Amino acid sequence: MASEDSGLQNQVVVLHTGYSREDGTAMRANCTCTLIRCRDGTNIVVDTMTAWDGELLRSLLSDQGLDVGDIHAVVCTHGHSDHIGCNYLFQEARMHLVGACASHRDLYMDHFGSEAEDEQLALDSNGEVVVQRTSGHTLSCVSVIVKNSQLGGTVGITGDLFERREDVDNESIWIGAGSEDEKKQRMERSKIAHLCDFIVPGHGPLFLISPEMRSKLKQDALSV
Ligand SMILES: [Zn+2]
């Protein structure tokens, strides 16, 4: 198992930068995969790419000095195949969370069982790394919010709530990627943008949220 991390901040490491693009009449897509090294020693992987990426993910973790057995929790922002494919690697993890559904082997846990929209699940002992519902792309979508990160602020690892940075100016990007509830998604996008300094989107590189982006997203949420 990993040794205790005595750092003062939670480390957010993007292991693999996702993408999505048209390929003829089909699509090519894979997700952004992120490692969180919480300062209490808890290691979390968010979104595990496709089932064909096992060796890649092992080697990306190995570059960080970690083995698959060092991961304590797996969070998939939602249940689409490019976000859950390598969950099978992490059999030592205490929990796999797929959207708002948490399980370990054949045991399904009662997290997110309350009707409260703002229910949160802390993954670390400091309560700085929490999962919350951010529905829209799917109705069961969640995001991981990392406070006190080494980047100097709060990071939202949001899955396909944000497809990539460019979708702030061009809504057709996230809507075209599929949304089960566009109105809800607009509201959650604005909420997360106001909560976070950085976003790790579902299919692109990490980006900084500017005040202009915040007000654009707020306008979008209010205008519909
Ligand atoms: Zn996706």
Image (cartoon, grey):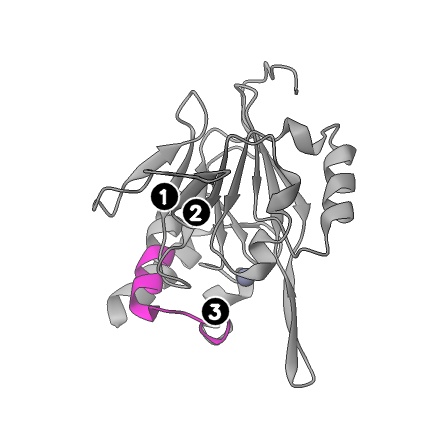
Q: Which of the numbered marks, if any, corresponds to residue 174? A: 3
Q: Is mark 3 within 8 Å of ligand 1?
A: no
Q: Earlier in the sequence, mark 2 or mark 3?
A: 2
For the residue marked with disc 1, what is the amino acid?
Gln
Compare residues 37 and 75 and report the one nearer the observer: 75
Compare residues 84 and 156 and report the one nearer the observer: 84
Counting other residues with Cα less than 10 Å from the Cα at mark 3, is it few (<14), some (14-19), or many (20 or more)?
many
The residue shown at (41%, 69%) is 179
Q: Can you name the residue that lies furthest to the front here?
A: 106
Residue 123 position by quadrant: top left
> In the rendering, at what x and y percent does residue 136 appear?
36, 62
Report, in whole angstroms, how far the alpha carbon at label 1 lies from the one at label 3. 20 Å
Report, in whole angstroms, how far the alpha carbon at label 1 lies from the one at label 2. 6 Å
Q: Can you name the residue that lies furthest to the left here?
A: 115
Q: Quadrant of ligand 1?
A: bottom right
Main SS, magenta region, reads: helix
> Which residues are the magenta region?
174-189
> In the rendering, at what x and y percent does residue 114 appear?
23, 42
Height in image: 162 above or below 100? below
The residue shown at (52%, 31%) is 149
> How many callouts does the rendering have?
3
Q: Are marks 1 and 2 in contact (CB under 8 Å)?
A: yes
Q: Quadrant of the N terminus?
A: top right
Q: Which of the numbered marks, if any, corresponds to residue 132? A: 1
The residue shown at (44%, 58%) is 161
Counting other residues with Cα less than 10 Å from the Cα at mark 1, is it few (<14), some (14-19), or many (20 or more)?
many
Q: Secondary structure at mark 3?
A: helix
> In the rendering, at what x and y percent does residue 90 appear?
62, 37
Q: Nearer the viewer, mark 2 or mark 3?
A: 2
Q: Is residue 203 visible?
A: no
